[in-house]
């Protein structure tokens, strides 16, 4: 008899083994937009949260389909850490982040600074900074603010912009890049 935790770990181990072989056998696509839109057999994200100390390294797409259990874990990981409110994260944002990570060719996980924001958190942040939008896409689960220690804000932003998958904001002074699945646009330095 298996409990839920054992089944989850076993499934993850199987998926991990599959991912290792699929990644090494998968062709390299120079057009990242094609990869971001589903040309690969698997998609994986790697994140670390300095706010909660949590890590996530998960395959969320296999053979043309999102893995619902993985998306649930991503939703939890991207929660508003200030009040633990969870919201569905738009898979387009996850795809955008994963495609950019692949372009950068790094194994280092992204550090997640902000994923979903509850209305209360967004209002609090807006009161402290003029750089927080009133109708932020973070409120809809359609944005994330990230950094990589091994890449500059400019390098991350350039890779993201090449995806043509949404909004990219450079925040060099705070050392992070904003990703969202809204209209294609970029800002900042």
Image (spheres, rainbow, N blue to C red):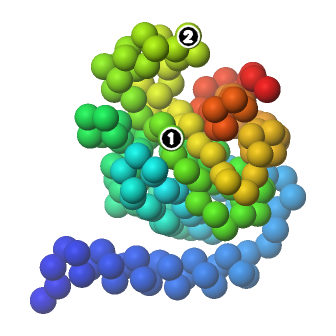
Figure quadrant of the N terminus: bottom left
Q: Which quarter of the picture shows residue 64?
A: bottom right
Mark 2 neighbour density, 10 Å: few (under 14) some (14–19) many (20 or more):
few
- Name the spot of residue 45 as percent of width and height, x first: 55, 59
Q: Which quarter of the picture shows residue 164?
A: top right
For the residues bearing labels 1 and 2, Cβ distance under 8 angstroms? no
**Is disc 2 placed on a helix, strand or loop?**
loop
Residue at the image point whose x is 67% and y is 38% from the top = 175
**Is disc 1 placed on a helix, strand or loop?**
strand
- Name the spot of residue 179 as percent of width and height, x first: 62, 35
The residue where tag 1 is placed is 113
The residue where tag 2 is placed is 130
Residue at the image point whose x is 66% and y is 52% from the top = 148
Seen from the viewer's position, the closer of residues 162 and 79 is 79
Residue at the image point whose x is 30% and y is 75% from the top = 8
Mark 1 neighbour density, 10 Å: few (under 14) some (14–19) many (20 or more):
some
Which of the two labelled residues, at mark 1 and mark 2, occupies the earlier sequence position? Answer: 1
Q: Which quarter of the picture shows residue 86?
A: top left
């Amino acid at each position: 008899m298996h409990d839920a935790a054992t089944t989850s770990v076993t499934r993850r181990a199987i998926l991990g083994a599959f991912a290792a072989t699929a990644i090494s056998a998968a062709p390299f696509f120079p057009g990242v937009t094609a990869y971001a839109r589903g040309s690969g057999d698997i998609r994986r994200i790697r994140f670390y949260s300095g706010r909660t100390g949590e890590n996530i390294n998960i395959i969320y797409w296999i053979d043309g389909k999102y893995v619902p259990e993985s998306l649930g874990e991503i939703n939890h990981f991207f929660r508003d850490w200030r009040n633990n409110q969870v919201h569905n994260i738009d898979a387009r944002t996850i795809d955008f982040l994963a495609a950019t990570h692949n372009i950068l060719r790094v194994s280092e996980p992204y550090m997640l600074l902000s994923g979903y924001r509850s209305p209360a958190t967004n209002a609090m942040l807006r009161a402290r900074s003029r750089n927080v939008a009133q109708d932020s896409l973070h409120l809809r689960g359609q944005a994330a603010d990230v950094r990589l220690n091994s890449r500059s804000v400019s390098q991350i932003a350039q890779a993201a912009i090449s995806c043509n998958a949404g909004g990219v904001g450079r925040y060099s002074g705070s050392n992070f890049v904003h990703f969202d699945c809204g209209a294609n646009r970029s800002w900042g330095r």
